[in-house]
């Protein structure tokens, strides 16, 4: 018997989440983890600098009051409708911890954000993965799958596609348990589902400051829902889940919405150009409302293309998983970065020998 038999079987059986590569140093064009190519607000820098004091010997505010207050103002909600997380990753983990006993069902359309699989496996849950139809409409039977937790990533990763909010609006009454709407990329999209939290006590909307607000390195996520739901979730979070620096940086970023919108507009313009050029190169690209696109060459494994780009210092995301290996997920960088990518991409999606 292994000496590690004190590890839970569910954990020993799982592979663990594999994050996109984060190269340290070097001149890399990084289009693999959907970061924002533009800098955060100068107010964020000031807020971070102001944290450099002996006050760091004190724990941060366990309730992240300054950040939640800024979020409540920004989204025109009462303060008690907001929970803060160490990235929205932590909020997803909190949901699973609070809701799932071993064997409980967690349901979501796939392919999607693969962390859901990892968190479901850690919980020992029964994971029900419903394939997206070709048009990326909500899979039929998503409610009938009877999840204790149902997750819809909207816009979805890695497809970038969106389900209309009218379709989502019907789900809270149909699902048996909690509906999580993961809106990590929603600032790049045309519509959002925040209004659903007022009508339903079983809806949690998740956002992040990692993408549109250019703060992936700060680890700031926000959850929106009715106070009774958030109070239950709050019981299972780490006590001091956001650092002093993250709380201050997040509050400052939310105070500069104009800059966020300006950067989102630039990303959307580059996304349109990238999509057209990829299609001209022979890739199928579903319409993206996120800060990345999924470029597919049906049936042609894209690993050689990924490797070739990497050798040229351009990182994109390749998923060695069934149904995705013939696609590359490409984050929308600056125009110059995307020009370099397009110049390096082989026509037809297959590198010449
Ligand atoms: N949801 C989705 C769909 C994502 O792609 C990501 C980023 N990888 C997250 C949530 C988590 O974002 P963060 O933890 O940086 O807030």
Image (cartoon, helix red, strand yellow):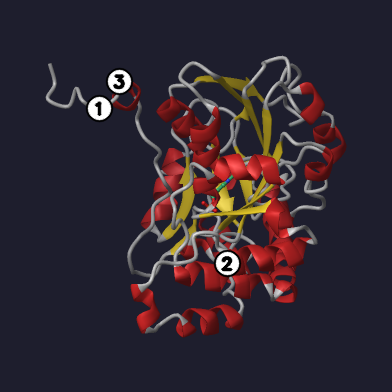
Question: Element under label 2?
Answer: loop
Q: Give the camera-side residue of 279 and 223.
A: 223
| Rendering coords of residue 18 (x, y %) | 39, 41
Check disc 3 and report the residue beneath it: 9
Q: Give the camera-side residue of 135 and 95.
A: 95
Question: Element under label 3?
Answer: helix
Residue at left offset 68%, top offset 41%: 228
Q: Is residue 81 left or right of residue 47?
A: right
Check disc 1 and report the residue beneath it: 7
2 and 3 marks in contact (CB < 8 Å): no
Q: Tell me if residue 26 comes above or below residue 273 in the rendering.
A: below
Q: Give how far apart the Cα atoms at labels 3 and 1 are.
A: 6 Å
3 and 1 marks in contact (CB < 8 Å): yes
Q: Give the camera-side residue of 158 and 95.
A: 95
Sort mark 3 into few (<14), some (14-19) or many (20+) by Cα contacts within 10 Å. few
Q: Tell me if residue 184 comes above or below residue 336 in the rendering.
A: above
Q: Give how far apart the Cα atoms at labels 2 and 3 are.
A: 38 Å
Q: Quadrant of residue 134?
A: top right
Q: Is residue 152 left or right of residue 47?
A: right
| Mark closer to the chain start, 2 or 3 | 3
Check disc 2 and report the residue beneath it: 214
Image quadrant occupied by the C terminus: top left
């Amino acid at each position: 018997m292994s000496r590690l038999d004190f590890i839970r079987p569910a954990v020993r059986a799982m592979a663990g989440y594999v994050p996109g590569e984060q190269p340290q140093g070097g001149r890399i064009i990084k289009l693999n983890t959907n970061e924002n190519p533009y800098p955060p607000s100068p107010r964020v820098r000031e807020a971070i600098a102001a944290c450099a004091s002996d006050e760091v010997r004190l724990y941060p505010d366990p309730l992240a009051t300054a950040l939640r207050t800024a979020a409540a103002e920004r989204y025109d909600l009462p303060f008690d409708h907001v929970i803060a997380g160490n990235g929205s990753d932590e909020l997803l983990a909190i949901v699973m911890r609070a809701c799932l006993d071993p064997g409980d069902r967690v349901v979501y359309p796939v392919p999607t954000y693969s962390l859901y699989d990892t968190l479901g496996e850690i919980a020992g849950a029964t994971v029900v993965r419903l394939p997206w139809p070709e048009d990326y409409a909500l899979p039929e039977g998503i409610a009938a799958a009877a999840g204790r937790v149902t997750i819809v990533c909207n816009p979805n990763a890695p497809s970038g596609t969106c389900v209309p909010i009218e379709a989502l609006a019907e789900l809270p009454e149909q699902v048996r348990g909690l509906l999580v709407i993961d809106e990590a990329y929603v600032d790049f999209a045309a519509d959002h589902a925040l209004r659903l939290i007022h009508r339903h006590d079983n809806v949690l909307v998740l956002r992040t400051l990692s993408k549109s607000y250019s703060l992936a390195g700060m680890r700031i996520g926000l959850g929106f829902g009715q106070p009774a739901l958030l109070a239950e979730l709050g019981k299972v979070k780490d006590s001091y889940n956001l650092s002093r620096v993250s709380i201050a940086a997040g509050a400052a970023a939310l105070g500069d919405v104009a800059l966020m919108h300006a950067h989102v507009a630039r990303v959307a313009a580059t996304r349109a150009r990238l999509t057209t050029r990829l299609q001209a190169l022979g890739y199928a690209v579903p319409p993206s409302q996120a800060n990345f696109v999924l470029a597919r060459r049906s049936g042609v494994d894209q690993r050689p293309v990924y490797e070739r780009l990497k050798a040229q210092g351009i990182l994109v995301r390749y998923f060695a998983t069934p149904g995705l290996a013939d696609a590359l997920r490409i984050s929308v960088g600056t125009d110059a970065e995307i020009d370099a990518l397009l110049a390096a991409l082989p026509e037809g999606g297959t590198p010449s020998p």
